[in-house]
Amino acid sequence: MSLIPATILTGFLGSGKTTLLKRVLNEAHGQKIAVIENEFGEENIDSDILLTESKEQIIQMSNGCICCTIREDLRATLQLLAAKRRKGLLDFDRVVIETTGLADPGPVAQTFFMDDEIAETYLLDSILTLVDAKHAAQQLNDRQEARRQVGFADQIFISKTDLVAREETDALMHRLKHMNPRAPQKAVHFGEVTLKEVFDLRGFNLNAKLDIDPDFLKEDDHDHHGHDHDHHDHAHGEHCDHPSHAHEGHGHHHHHDDDVKSFVFRSDRAFDAARLEDFLGAIVNIYGPRMLRYKGVLNMKGTERKVIFQGVHQLMGSDLGPQWAEGEARTSKMVFIGLDLPREIFLQGLEQCLV
């Protein structure tokens, strides 16, 4: 039996998660969706409306927001759903987990990696983050949870762009790109997104292409460091002369040095598998809680195939991908997204794992 895809829907309070979810449930797509919702505050969907409108089986968790303490609960809920589905008591094609406005999606995502039974039943498809354009700047400045949600995203939807000036949206998108270069961003109006933009994104799929926006990597070519350029790109942060930072005096774009940042490592030399494994094991041990998402396509000595790896916090997985194509440059590329990670330690350490 094929795995049940699961989508985690996260986002700031009031960003329109509920609107998006209702829209997805009401659209005539012929899919049966089980929604796992975390009752918390006044933001929860009224279950009566959902039940009458869409015949979905709604599992309400009674004990509040998702955080580490609820991890057991989410697991139990997922196991119960799967068991009922196997016995033919429930019929659903996929699961959407809506987290509360202030939740850290990390533990939710980890649930899918940690438990064998869950891993054999469900496939974590992607994490979607809704960002409210009107309140984003304030929320990102004030709340680390909001920044973490951005760092975890496979896809970012920006709501309420009609309520703010164009420049404000541009500045927000630029800021989000610093924090998470691998998630595509899309402005949405009242939760109007097509299902293909929400489901089966394969954001977590190890075999998927490494989706770092190529322009993000290029933005650095015009910063004049000169050093180590062939080895690793500096995602711009400390020394960014991107055009939009030039307007700071005009109140157009205040550069926030957010704690959620990303950086990229690239090299044309192959990795030594044993050394890389030791090094990654060590950094995950120390920095795991601050490592939100990391992903890479690696050129590994001793195999003609790409090695694809990714992780969330302390949990890391790798997989053999397709063969390197004839004439394809065998460049390793890794992206790390995390909270104040010591970039130099990572980059130098990775450098030392090369053959």
Image: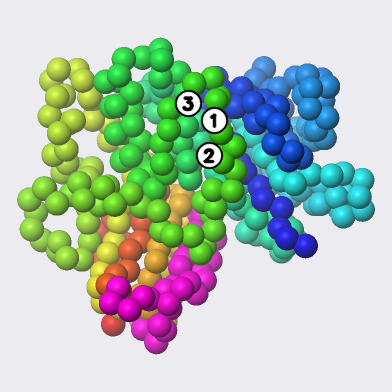
Q: Disc 2 versus disc 3: distance between alpha carbons?
A: 11 Å
The answer to whether residue 238 is left or right of residue 89 is left
| Residue position marked by numbered label 1 in the rendering | 193
Badge 1 vs badge 3, beta-carbon distance below 8 Å: yes
Q: Earlier in the sequence, mark 2 or mark 3?
A: 3
Q: Disc 1 versus disc 3: distance between alpha carbons?
A: 7 Å
Q: Give the amino acid type for the residue marked by disc 3 in the picture.
A: Val
Image position, residue 312 (x, y; %): 51, 54
Q: Which of marks 1 and 3 is nearer the N terminus?
A: 3
The answer to whether residue 288 is left or right of residue 76 is left
| Residue position marked by numbered label 3 in the rendering | 188
Q: Which of 120 and 201 is in front in this view?
A: 201
Residue 22 covered by magenta stretch:
no
Image position, residue 139 (x, y; %): 43, 24
Label 3 SS: strand
Query: Dot 3: within a 10 Å radius of its alpha carbon, few (fewer than 14), some, or many (20 or more) residues?
Result: many
Q: Image quadrant for the N terminus?
A: bottom right
- Give the image quarter of residue 243: top left
Observer able to see residue 284: yes
| Residue position marked by numbered label 2 in the rendering | 197
Badge 2 vs badge 1, beta-carbon distance below 8 Å: yes
